[in-house]
């Protein structure tokens, strides 16, 4: 199979860029899907701050694969959409500075059970976002997410086919949390998926390391690679109990949870290791 490029939401290891760089380097990762940096959401940093981040990452031999933006993660009924489009324009400028060719986005929160009522409004707003990004050299990549219009596979498919310019991000855990069968979702969407979020979950929605849940992550990953896919982002979302080490006695480990870790760094490393085990 082709070589896999592994990136990560390194803000789950550390809120500080220096800590993120350390986490990526010790796990042998290529770079990051940048979401939070030095206490700020990526969409809120200044252009000057973006240049500083780029310099540090270049010096460390790391890249920004994608912007893990919050674009589209607002209520569909929000009257602040014009300002949201301005934020998209800002993030596209940040993408250029950071060298990112992809921008993760969403299709708006809709009231539960009322997705069909808001279909036309969602299509209109996503269309406006696509037009803003046109010519930027940055791909808008739609992620399935709980509570948004594109939370289920059929509505993701509708968006991706309505807007050929859109790319897909496939997150198995998010589908599990919505009650969507991940294998059926993959069969429907795989021709339009640009990259995967490596995240698994149990039937009750609890996130666990890749391969330990019911997301069929190994099978999806293998098929993705066999079809030429080569980029994934590790998104740990694992439980952290900072006080765990204080409960330990020599030779007597306290079992708080099978997948609960004593620090963010430990949880991040476990998520990276789980993916490597699947490979």
Image: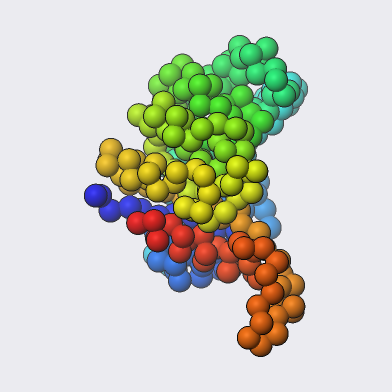
Q: Position of residue 221 (x, y in %)?
A: 38, 45
Q: Residue at x 71, y 27 (%)?
A: 75
The answer to whether 274 appears left or right of 222 in the picture is right
- As drawn, 151 above or below 104: above
Residue 95 in sight here: no
Q: Position of residue 28 (x, y in %)?
A: 40, 66
The answer to whether 208 appears left or right of 133 in the picture is right
- As drawn, 152 above or below 207: above
Q: Residue at x 53, y 49 (%)?
A: 213
Q: Residue at x 67, y 63 (%)?
A: 257
Residue 114 in sight here: yes
Q: Residue at x 52, y 66 (%)?
A: 269
Name the residue nearer the viewer: 74 or 279: 279
Question: Of all residues shown, which one is farthest toward the left?
Answer: 1
- As drawn, 17 above or below 45: below
Figure quadrant of residue 107 = top right
Q: Position of residue 120 (x, y in %)?
A: 61, 11
Q: Position of residue 91 (x, y in %)?
A: 56, 40
**What quarter of the picture does the C terminus occupy?**
bottom left
């Amino acid at each position: 199979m082709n070589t896999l490029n592994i990136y990560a939401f390194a803000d789950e290891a550390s809120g500080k860029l220096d800590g993120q760089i350390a986490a990526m380097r010790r796990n042998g990762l290529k770079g990051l899907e940048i979401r939070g940096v030095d206490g700020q959401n990526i969409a809120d940093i200044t252009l000057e701050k973006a240049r500083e981040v780029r310099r540090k990452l270049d010096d460390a031999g790391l890249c920004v694969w994608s912007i893990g933006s919050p674009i589209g993660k607002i209520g569909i009924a929000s009257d602040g959409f014009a300002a949201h489009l301005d934020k998209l324009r800002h993030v596209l400028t940040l993408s250029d500075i950071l060298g990112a060719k992809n921008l993760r986005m969403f299709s708006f929160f809709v009231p539960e059970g009322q997705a069909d009522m808001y279909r036309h409004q969602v299509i209109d707003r996503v269309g406006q976002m696509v037009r803003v990004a046109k010519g930027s050299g940055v791909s808008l990549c739609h992620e399935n997410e709980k509570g948004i219009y594109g939370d289920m596979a059929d509505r993701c498919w509708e968006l991706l086919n309505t807007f050929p310019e859109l790319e897909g991000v496939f997150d198995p855990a998010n589908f599990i949390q919505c009650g969507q069968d991940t294998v059926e979702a993959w069969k429907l969407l795989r021709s339009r998926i640009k990259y995967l979020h490596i995240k698994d979950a149990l039937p009750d929605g609890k996130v666990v390391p890749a391969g330990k849940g019911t997301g069929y992550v190994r099978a999806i990953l293998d098929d993705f690679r066999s079809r030429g896919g080569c980029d994934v982002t590790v998104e740990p979302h694992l439980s952290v109990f900072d006080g765990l080490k204080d409960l330990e006695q020599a030779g007597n480990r306290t079992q708080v949870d099978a997948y609960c870790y004593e620090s963010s760094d430990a949880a991040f490393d476990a998520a990276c290791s789980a993916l490597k085990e699947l490979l």
